[in-house]
């Protein structure tokens, strides 16, 4: 069986689940609370546990007898491209631990991983969060102001205080990871497991133009955190904090890039299905869209292979993320032009996707931040290693 064949069952299965999900996209946009009702559908139901590492996952994904590991970027980019083709908003609003799980896998000790993944397997569906962005600090994660203060005279361990914004599933989540400061300087930025039931923890909805119902805010008012919940203490000092989210984000950027590709493909397919006869330059414009989608998709798969080899190798992941953000925005906007001036009113799904596409730019860092990453990697000699990985075939092309 070739590499291409080995990903086909995953792709085909995810596409079937995604098509079912899509039927509910507009309903939940009108009422974001309906997201909870979708947890019974196959895709959200599977997502609730899919990103849990194999050793903690009693229900791994097996399709046609093949095991898929949805903590590996190469499998994730295939799965999440199809899922986002169904509807990106609903995928981001689904239960599970795509973001938080990536942090716990890198920074959690055995007991913390058992506690966290155990919550997800015992109580289904469980939504989780990764809270990093603050009202005054989005791109600069090292500048977080939320504080995690040690409470020396108390069994509580720590107190967490601060505010977070633009947090996925903030109002639905039962547990998650908060990035907070334990002391001044870059080594003082740490991650901590937080139970949403803890007194002093409040959340709010954040109304948005696209991806309705996904984002929210969080406030921590001296939330008591047991001492065993601080992530990374078993690791060397330089690996306890920012290293965890830098390497997690390198992987997650390939997933967001795949989501951008899936969203663009959804808009492209929508045009193909609803405008069977094209005239004039329309045919060439559609062909150009297909070529653009395929080029970003190939870059995304190459980036996934690179981060699976070395999660510290994020240059291609950042490049793919820049390409996918632009792709999603351009293709969804151009798709609307195939349906005339009333397109946004007459084709609500396409209108929704064009608004949802704007969110891809911000997830896991904006394009400017990715460009800085690429430039930094090139200055450190990344061009040579990128050339080597390309020459070696990029480690597989799902
Ligand atoms: C759909 C969606 C889901 C999200 N999910 C989460 C989540 O689950 N958890 C979470 O913590 N956050 C989440 N976010 C927040 C996201 O990570 C931030 O929006 C993003 O990091 C940018 O931060 P900001 O919005 O504060 O913009 P800012 O950092 O204020 O940036 C504003 C502009 O300035 C530019 N800029 C900033 N710094 C530089 C620089 N050094 N050089 C050049 N240009 C610069 C940026 O590119 C941008 O164009 C989500 C956002 C969206 C839209």
Image (tube, grey):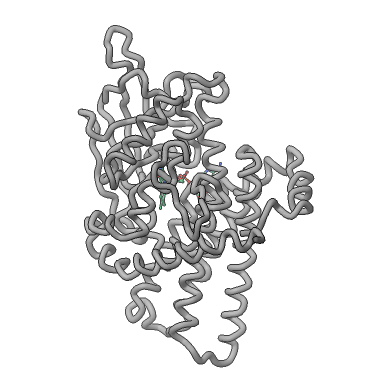
Residue 251 at what x, y percent from top left? 55, 45
Answer with the quarter of the image where residue 28 lies. Answer: bottom left
Residue 364 in view (yes/no): yes
Q: Which residue extends farthest top?
A: 153
Residue 193 at what x, y percent from top left? 36, 30
Answer with the quarter of the image where residue 17 lies. Answer: bottom left
Residue 252 at what x, y percent from top left? 51, 46
Q: Between residues 272 and 288, which one lies in front from this camera angle?
A: 272
For the point 66% across and 61% down, which residue is it?
2
Which quadrant, please, contains the N terminus?
A: bottom right
Query: Taking 379 as reference, is 250 left or right?
Result: left
Answer with the quarter of the image where residue 35 lies. Answer: bottom left
For the point 32% across and 31% down, which residue is it?
194
Q: Which residue extends farthest left?
A: 199
Q: Which residue extends farthest front?
A: 65
Residue 88 at what x, y percent from top left? 41, 60
Q: How many marks?
A: 0
Relative to residue 147, is residue 246 depicted above or below? below
Query: Taking 64 as reference, is 311 left or right?
Result: right
Q: Between residues 167 and 49, which one lies in front from this camera angle?
A: 49
For the point 32% across and 25% down, which residue is it?
160
Relative to residue 394, is residue 286 depicted above or below? below
For the point 30% across and 46% down, which residue is it?
216
Which quadrant, please, contains the C terminus?
A: bottom right
Residue 296 in view (yes/no): no
Query: Taking 388 as reference, is 127 left or right?
Result: left
Query: Taking 30 as reference, is 69 left or right?
Result: right
């Amino acid at each position: 069986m070739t590499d291409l064949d080995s990903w086909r069952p995953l792709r085909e299965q995810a596409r079937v689940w995604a098509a079912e999900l899509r039927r509910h996209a507009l309903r939940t946009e009108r009422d974001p609370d309906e997201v909870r009702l979708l947890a019974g559908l196959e895709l959200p139901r599977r997502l609730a546990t899919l990103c849990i590492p194999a050793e903690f996952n009693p229900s791994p994904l097996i399709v046609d007898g093949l095991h898929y590991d949805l903590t590996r970027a190469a499998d994730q980019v295939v799965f999440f491209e199809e899922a986002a083709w169904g509807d990106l908003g609903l995928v981001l609003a689904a239960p599970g631990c795509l973001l938080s799980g990536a942090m716990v896998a890198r920074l959690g000790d055995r007991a913390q991983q058992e506690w966290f993944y155990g919550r997800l397997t015992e109580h289904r569906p469980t939504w989780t969060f990764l809270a990093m962005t603050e009202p005054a600090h989005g791109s600069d994660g090292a500048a977080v102001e939320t504080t995690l203060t040690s409470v020396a005279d108390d069994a509580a361990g720590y107190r967490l205080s601060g505010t977070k914004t633009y947090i996925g599933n903030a109002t639905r989540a039962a547990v998650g990871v908060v990035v907070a400061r334990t002391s001044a300087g870059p080594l003082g930025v740490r991650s901590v497991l937080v139970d949403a039931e803890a007194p002093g923890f409040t959340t709010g909805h954040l109304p948005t133009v696209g991806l309705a119902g996904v984002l929210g805010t969080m406030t921590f008012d001296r939330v008591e955190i047991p001492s065993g919940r601080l992530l990374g203490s078993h690791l060397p000092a330089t690996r306890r904090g920012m290293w965890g989210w830098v390497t997690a984000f390198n992987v997650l950027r390939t997933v967001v890039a795949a989501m951008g590709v899936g969203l663009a493909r959804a808009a492209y397919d929508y045009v193909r299905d609803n405008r069977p006869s094209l005239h004039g330059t329309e045919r060439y414009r559609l062909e150009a869209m297909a070529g653009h989608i395929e080029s970003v998709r190939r870059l995304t798969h190459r980036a996934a292979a690179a981060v699976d080899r070395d999660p510290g190798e994020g240059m291609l992941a950042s490049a793919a993320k820049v390409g996918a953000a632009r792709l999603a925005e351009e293709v969804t906007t151009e798709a609307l032009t195939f349906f005339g001036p009333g397109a946004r009113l007459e084709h609500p799904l396409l209108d929704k996707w064009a608004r949802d596409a704007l969110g891809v730019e911000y997830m896991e860092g904006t394009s400017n931040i990715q460009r800085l990453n690429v430039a930094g990697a090139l200055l450190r000699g990344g061009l040579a290693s990128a050339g080597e990985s390309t020459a070696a075939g990029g480690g597989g092309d799902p």
